[in-house]
Amino acid sequence: MSTLTSIYSFIKHLRGDTPWDVEVNANYDSIDAELARPRQPFNSPVVGATTTCDLSLARIFVFTVSQATTLAFTNVPSSSFGVRVVLRITNGSAFVLTLPASMVPLSGVAPIFKSSGVDLVEMLTIDGGTTWYYGLLDRPLNRLIGQAVADVGTGAATIETTLHTVAVPANILGPNGALRIRVHFTVTGGAAAKQIAVYYGAFQIGLSAQAAGETVTNGIMEVMMVNRNATNAQHYAFYVTDTDTTVNFNGGTATADSTAALNITVKGTTPNAADEVTAHVTLVELLRA
């Protein structure tokens, strides 16, 4: 008695089976259809403390991040073969999703997945899974490389105080790459002069200053910093709401070493403890040249 293949249900004959011609013709038609309009089976791995993608089952994996989980891969073909895998991840940052160290992002930085929504990840290995090169399919060039979303204020401090920090990995800018930084902030209290500043490493690349009596209800600062044909020379420009009715534009140069890992740091200064500078959201985006 003939049997069927497990995926596409092609007919497998036993010796002596008849009639071969009708079933073989049907198989050829099915193979022809699959070559012209290929279908791939997908697998939905169980999401637990570890979410295991078993490559003996599929090359497309579909799952929703419903708890903190660590991604793992099993039954990867040997290094004699190149293997491509696609992940459809829903709510990827709703909980902590830990990627294995073998996954190397093509952009140089790990992606920030959507907390509500779908991300598509394409991966390739040619060494049996020792290294997986991967990237997000919807964001090939520009990439949000870090964010801080907690409200952090200066409190009673009367010196420059760090409010938000976002790490920028080494070597991701190259000689002509750029960073775009957006900061949402508020400034309250009128006792003395205040300011909020953005730094790349030790270099100040954005500044909003308020005189005594000035406040900012809906503050926005946007900084663009570009490596200028070298990894240690930058141009920067920024605009910022210095008060609720005034906007300042400014810029300059810096000489930070972008081959080193450096931080984007948002700092607030309030000489009087009765005043407050609060950073609400800081977004850091990598722009490819």
Image (cartoon, grey):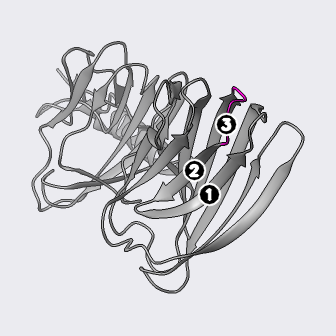
The three-letter amino acid code for the residue at tag 1 is Gly
C-alpha separation, residue under disc 3 versus residue under disc 2: 17 Å
Residue at screen point 52% across, 29% down: 149
Frontmost of labels 3 and 2 is 3
221 over 141 or under it: above or below: above
Q: Nearer the viewer, mark 3 or mark 1?
A: 3
**Among all residues in the image, which is located at the extreme right?**
245
Which residue is disc 3 drawn over? 192
- Of mark 2 and mark 1, the one earlier in the sequence is 2
Per the image, the residue denoted by label 2 is 197
Asked if 287 appears above or below 68 in the picture, the reply is below
Q: Say which amino acid is labelled 3.
A: Ala
Which residue in the protein does label 1 denote? 206
Q: Position of residue 88 (x, y in %)?
A: 43, 32
Which tag, 3 or 2, sits closer to the chain's start? 3
Label located before the other in sequence (3 or 1)? 3
Q: Are marks 2 and 1 in contact (CB under 8 Å)?
A: yes
Instruction: Answer with left or right where residue 93 lies relative to residue 144.
Output: left
- Contact between marks 3 and 1 (CB within 8 A): the answer is no
Q: Nearer the viewer, residue 176 or 237?
A: 237
